Image (spheres, coloured by chain):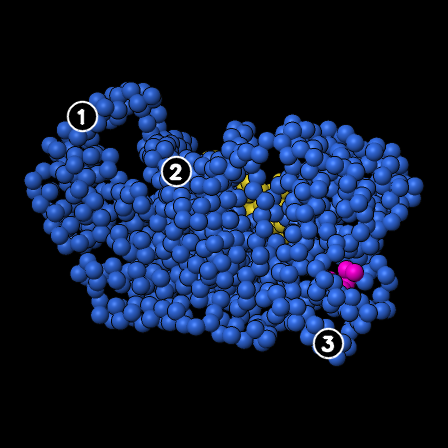
């Protein structure tokens, strides 16, 4: 038979499985919002003359989502010969809501009641023959997965010639619908009248815009609708929705032969706790804190320490054999030759003078931790020396004679040592040795050093996604976001953004409201992406002694920035409007499949390594070259010992570092790191790998962290913003807003933190108070109520 | 000639690095032309939802 058959139904009702069974194709089957936004076509295996069209899964034919618009436009404009409405027999009530809408389209229809096998297992059964009297069309019981009932279904399709019976609403509504059909829809073909009258009653402009009704007719209809709304004390759309559900409940009573065992599933029981109105949010906060704590502070750190200190450091003892003996020997040596009373007095004086890092050096010496001492000393000694405290001369000489770890066990040298020795052995030029060891290996190694922490984080997030928890978080966050004018739908891009902001920004496409979509694009990059994790881990380890709270606080700063932005911008004309309804089907909880979790972790980790070997490597060479090329006494030259201030990097950094002085990190290195972060956020860490932390206090470092978390994302993400906004003006607005907010929050944090630690600066505190007042004003002011005004930036 | 012999290691390693840099830049340019991120961001590759994400499919089709 030469016919066109459309396949329509709820998401996850088994449409694609049925499509594959009937056509023999192998379309991807999944369960995530927006799986099928385009329709698919195929020819029936048993009848090549019949074309089957698989429409996107929809819950209704309202104009809220792209999927709904695609499905509805196809059914109305293309008008297939027969419609197969696939309904999930295990979730009939929700599925039949769509059936009541499809029945109004005037297209011959067959209802395919899917998952008959599962219903049988549950002891559920239906009076299939009653569908004919209740909906005016045949129904067939099938299992798309097991391919049972396929022949019966296709036979019913062949018999379907008449349109089903549309739902009868209450008399008051029916009276208005009748009047609408008689006055406004006389010219329409009969099959379209019912659909159009219901849509006019619901004030669905997208469905009725093509009717070109005169103003006085519209006015009459509006009066009739308003009268019913007044009588029922509800809006017209809700009246129709309510009556549809009432009718479905009634029909369900008549259809049910046996209800089976009604009991709560394990997923239902878990959901009662994790999506609970009061517990949902604290549980989510607790889980994220735990995830970041485990990844950044515990499991990940142990491995990261080995990668940083061993693999990309001096080396390590095989299986740790000899480490204890070496540490004992080297500590004894340091106590005798380095941490002498004179030395300690000088170091403590430097710490008292608040020279950056001096406290760390003293602390490590007092705790007799030679590893920590060596690390802190290497990082901060030049700065301490520059400040006039003579620590380096006696220390450097003593370190030369320090015990050799190779004497205490099987010592495996680190990558920099191996490469450095190899380059030395082949007599490579000094500049080349510098470029490879101090540039490439230091820069790439600094980034790769955080790989264990990142893999642990990716693993934790993949487990949460796989087991089905993250889908619930979107629901939990919907309650929070809705208060601020956004919906849970905005959380899905943010969730994806924890991996990389680029797909997160792209995922905003599924948000129908233009204002909400822009807002989501604007805020997605606030959540720490994988590239920002090394920055957080670096700051936590280097300046906060690996404090557990640094990483979770970074996540919550991102969430806070999203909520603050939602509150502030939703009150402006540019972003005003009610959030769209958020509907998402919860997948069943299940144990994560190890292969799938490991594949996700591997893919994310692999892309991180790929970036380290490409863009980070190139940028590291540029940074290294910039720090070694410069002007000495007016002469442009290269020197391995070039002072940073005289280097090209130093000159450029110096020119803009003043901007960051009020934020506490107006140093050349921090400025260079921030600017290079635009290339890729991992670059911030690479810069500190090549340069060092001299000049940064803990408060300044946290301010630096806040700024880098919230400011404009990397170029790749900016490109994604440009593509998704499709407007240079909106892209510029997004970047300026992000940088502005980052600057404001960092300024407030730094100035008040300095004030509370007794180091406040009057001008700085006044500036921070002024910025805080502006933020408070935009947060608490009443919303601008101008829904009819077109946004100023609306034009592309 | 003597200079080349004296600096053979430097020349060979430098040449190897230059080829590496060239390949990286060529890859970035190719990615950029294919509509992907030139700076090597994982994009959809780094996303666990890529197998079923409409955005990923759309960008793939676009590329």
Please name which of the two marks, 3 or 2, marks the residue nearer to the observer: 3
Q: How many marks?
A: 3
Question: Percent position (x, y) of residue A444?
Answer: 43, 41
Whichever of callouts 3 and 2 sits on the residue coming sooner in the sequence is 3
Local secondary structure at mark 3: helix
Q: Quadrant of residue A330?
A: top left
Q: Which residues are magenta?
A: A194-198
Whichever of callouts 1 and 2 sits on the residue coming sooner in the sequence is 2
Q: According to the image, label 2 marks what residue?
A: A295
Left-right relation of A476 to A15: left
Chain letter of mark 1 equals A
> What is the number of the mark on residue A220?
3
Left-right relation of A434 to A40: left
Q: According to the image, label 1 marks what residue?
A: A329
Query: Outermost residue toward the left?
Result: A341
> What is the number of the mark on residue A416?
none
Question: Percent position (x, y) of residue A773?
Answer: 33, 71
Please name which of the two marks, 1 or 3, marks the residue nearer to the observer: 3
At horizontal 78% and vertical 66% (from top left) the residue drawn is: A178
Local secondary structure at mark 2: helix
Q: Up-down: is A344 above or below A565?
A: above
Quadrant for the C terminus of chain A, please. Answer: bottom right
At horizontal 19% and vertical 61% (from top left) the residue drawn is: A759
Relative depth, front residue between A366 and A636: A366
Question: Percent position (x, y) of residue A489?
Answer: 55, 53
- Distance Cα–Cα, label 1 vs label 3: 96 Å
Q: Up-down: is A545 above or below A145?
A: below
């Amino acid at each position: 038979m030469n016919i066109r058959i459309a396949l329509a139904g709820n998401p996850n009702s088994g449409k694609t499985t049925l499509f594959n069974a009937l056509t023999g194709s192998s379309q991807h089957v999944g369960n995530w919002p927006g799986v099928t936004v385009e329709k698919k076509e195929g020819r029936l295996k048993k009848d090549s003359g019949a074309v089957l069209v698989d429409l996107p899964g929809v819950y209704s034919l309202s104009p809220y989502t792209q999927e709904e618009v695609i499905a509805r436009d196809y059914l109305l404009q293309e008008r297939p010969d027969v419609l197969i409405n696939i309904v999930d027999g295990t979730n009939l009530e929700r599925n039949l809501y769509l059936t009541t809408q499809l029945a109004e389209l005037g297209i011959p229809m067959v209802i395919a009641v899917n998952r008959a096998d599962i219903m049988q297992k549950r002891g559920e059964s239906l009076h299939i023959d009653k569908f004919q009297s209740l909906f005016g069309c045949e129904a067939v019981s099938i299992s798309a997965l097991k391919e049972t009932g396929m022949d019966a279904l296709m036979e019913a399709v062949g018999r379907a010639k008449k349109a089903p019976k549309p739902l009868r609403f209450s008399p008051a509504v029916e009276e208005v619908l009748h009047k609408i059909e008689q006055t406004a829809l006389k010219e329409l073909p009969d099959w379209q009248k019912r659909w159009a009258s219901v849509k006019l009653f619901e004030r669905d402009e997208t469905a009725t815009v093509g009717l070109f009704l005169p103003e006085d007719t519209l006015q009459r209809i509006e009066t009739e609708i308003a009268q019913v709304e007044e009588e029922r004390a509800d809006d017209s759309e809700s009246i129709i929705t309510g009556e549809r559900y009432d009718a479905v409940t009634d029909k369900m009573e008549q259809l049910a032969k046996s209800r089976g065992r009604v009991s709560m599933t394990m997923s239902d029981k878990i959901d009662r706790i994790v999506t609970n109105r009061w517990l949902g949010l604290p549980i989510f906060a607790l889980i994220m804190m735990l995830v970041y704590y485990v990844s950044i502070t515990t499991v990940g750190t142990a491995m990261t320490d080995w990668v940083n200190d061993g693999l990309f450091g001096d080396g390590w003892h095989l299986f740790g054999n000899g480490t204890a003996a070496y540490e004992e020997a080297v500590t004894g040596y340091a106590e005798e030759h380095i941490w002498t009373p004179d030395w300690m007095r000088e170091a403590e004086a430097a710490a008292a003078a608040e020279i950056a890092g001096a406290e760390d050096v003293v602390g490590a010496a007092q705790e007799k931790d030679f590893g920590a001492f060596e690390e802190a000393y290497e990082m901060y000694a030049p700065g301490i020396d520059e400040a006039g405290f003579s620590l380096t001369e006696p220390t450097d000489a003593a370190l030369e004679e320090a015990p050799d770890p190779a004497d205490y066990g099987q010592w495996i040298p680190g990558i920099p040592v191996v490469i450095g020795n190899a380059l030395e052995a082949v007599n490579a030029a000094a500049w080349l040795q510098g470029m490879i060891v101090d540039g490439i290996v230091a820069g790439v190694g600094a980034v790769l050093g955080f790989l264990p922490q990142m893999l642990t984080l990716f693993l934790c997030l993949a487990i949460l996604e796989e087991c089905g928890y993250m889908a619930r978080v979107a629901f939990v966050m919907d309650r929070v976001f809705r208060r601020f004018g956004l919906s849970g739908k905005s959380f899905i891009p943010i969730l994806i953004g924890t991996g990389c902001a680029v797909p997160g920004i792209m995922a905003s496409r599924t948000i129908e409201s233009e204002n909400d979509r822009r807002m989501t694009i604007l805020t997605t990059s606030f959540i720490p992406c994988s590239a920002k994790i090394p920055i957080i881990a670096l700051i936590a380890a280097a300046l906060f002694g690996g404090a557990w709270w640094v990483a979770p606080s970074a996540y919550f700063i991102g969430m806070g920035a999203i909520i603050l932005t939602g509150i502030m911008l939703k009150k402006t004309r540019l972003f005003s409007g009610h959030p769209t309804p958020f509907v998402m089907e919860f997948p069943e909880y299940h144990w994560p499949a190890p292969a799938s979790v490991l594949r996700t972790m591997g893919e994310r980790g692999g892309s991180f390594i790929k970036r380290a070997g490409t863009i980070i490597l190139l940028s590291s060479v540029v940074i290294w070259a910039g720090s070694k090329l410069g002007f000495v006494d007016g002469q442009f030259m290269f020197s391995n010992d070039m002072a940073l201030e005289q280097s090209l990097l130093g000159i450029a950094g110096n020119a803009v570092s003043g901007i960051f002085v009020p934020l506490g990190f107006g140093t050349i290195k921090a400025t260079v790191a921030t600017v290079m972060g635009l290339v890729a956020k991992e670059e911030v860490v690479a810069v500190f790998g090549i340069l060092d932390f001299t000049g940064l206090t803990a408060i300044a470092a946290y301010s630096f962290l806040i700024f880098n978390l919230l400011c404009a994302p990397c170029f790749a993400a900016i490109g994604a913003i440009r593509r998704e906004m499709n407007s240079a003006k909106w892209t510029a607005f997004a970047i300026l807003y992000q940088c502005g907010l980052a600057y404001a929050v960092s300024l407030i944090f730094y100035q008040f933190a300095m004030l509370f630690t007794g180091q406040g600066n009057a001008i700085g505190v006044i500036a921070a108070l002024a910025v805080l007042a502006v933020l408070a004003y935009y947060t608490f002011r009443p919303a601008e109520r101008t829904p009819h005004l077109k946004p100023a930036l609306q034009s592309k | 000639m003597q200079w080349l012999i004296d600096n053979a290691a430097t020349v060979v390693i430098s040449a190897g690095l230059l080829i590496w840099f060239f390949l990286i830049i060529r890859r970035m340019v190719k990615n950029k032309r294919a509509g992907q991120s030139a700076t090597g961001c994982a994009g959809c590759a780094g996303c666990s939802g890529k197998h079923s994400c409409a955005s990923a499919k759309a960008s793939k089709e676009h590329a």
